[in-house]
Amino acid sequence: MVASALLADINGIGWLVGVLGTIYTFVAAFTVVEVWTQFNGLASLIAKEAKAVTSIWNYVDYLNDSTVDRQMQKALIAYLKHAEEEKVDASNGVRSTHSSIELMQIFRIMDTIQFNDKRDAAIYPILVTAYEELSSVRSERIEAGTARIPSPLRIFFTILSLTLLTTFILLGFVSTGLYIYNIALVTIIISYAHTLILDLDNPFVGIWNIDYSAFAQTKKYIQGTRHSK
């Protein structure tokens, strides 16, 4: 009786699968683009932040001040280490404090610079600009690192995935082998799309993780560079 009823409504089920499939395609495409843009945006901000740190270190060389040079090297390395550690909080959706101790320490060292050379007055505004750039990029990186897909959209996508798969199972085929093949194929596609979106939505855990190597490379560069006096 149940089988007869399903066969009688097979055209209606096919129409429903088509409608759900179309909606699913649009939602999945929009969500994938959103999380991929967010993922790449965060990677770009990390690269910019590392560049800003490098700029500060390079500009310090013009001051010819061994004390400031030594203190700034220590402060920048501490900043980079802390920035790498912040990904633990970001993975849990916890927003780190923008004006961190390490960031403020860089500012304090800049405040101790003495203008005892004609180049100091010329390079100091550039150094301040680099610091402001670092502060701005840090703020953007913290915000981007904790941004997630809105819960209603994530729940809607999950329900839509399950509904489409369930409805597709009800769609009959004359060949049992073809039926099993299609069910397996649709299950793999929906599962992969769901995994891809949820994984990219949190770029700090899972299969696809954000690359923090820019911080490590910058730290290595600062540790291995000796400024001329």
Image: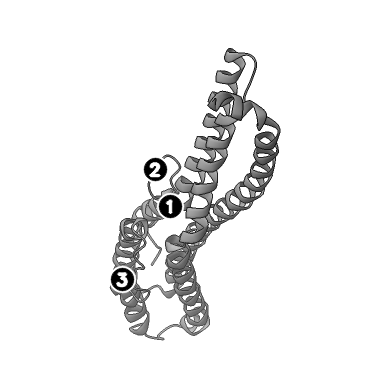
Q: Tell me the number on the disc at residue 218.
A: none
Q: Is residue 10 above or below residue 68?
A: above
Q: Nearer the viewer, residue 179 or 151?
A: 179
Q: How many marks?
A: 3
State the residue position of label 1: 202
* In the image, residue 124 above or below residue 139: below
Q: Tell me how far mark 3 sits from mark 1, CA to CA.
A: 25 Å
Which residue is denoted by mark 3 in the rendering?
102
Q: Residue 153 at what x, y percent from top left?
A: 52, 57
Q: Is residue 193 left or right of residue 204?
A: right
The C terminus, quarter of image: bottom left
- Say what amino acid the circle numbered 2 marks: Gly
| Amino acid type shown at disc 1 | Asn
Q: Position of residue 13 (x, y in %)?
A: 65, 35
Counting residues from the start of the chain, the first of labels 3 and 1 encountered is 3
Q: Nearer the viewer, residue 34 or 97?
A: 34
Please tell me which residue is depicted at 71% across the width and 33% down the height of the picture: 11
Give the spatial CA distance, label 2 vs label 3.
29 Å
Which type of secondary structure does the marked residue at label 3 adopt? helix
Which residue corresponds to the image point at 53% horizontal and 42% vertical from the top-left?
A: 163
Q: Marks 1 and 2, how far apart in space?
A: 8 Å
Give x and y (percent) for residue 94.
34, 65
* Residue at screen point 52% across, 31% down: 187
Q: Residues within 10 Å of mark 1 (few under 14, many from 20)?
A: many
Q: Position of residue 23 (x, y in %)?
A: 65, 48
Residues tagged 1 and 2 counted as in contact (Cβ below 8 A): yes
Residue type beneath disc 3: Glu
Q: SS at mark 2?
A: loop
Identify the residue at image location x=57%, y=40%. Answer: 164
Instruction: Report the residue marked by disc 2.
Output: 206
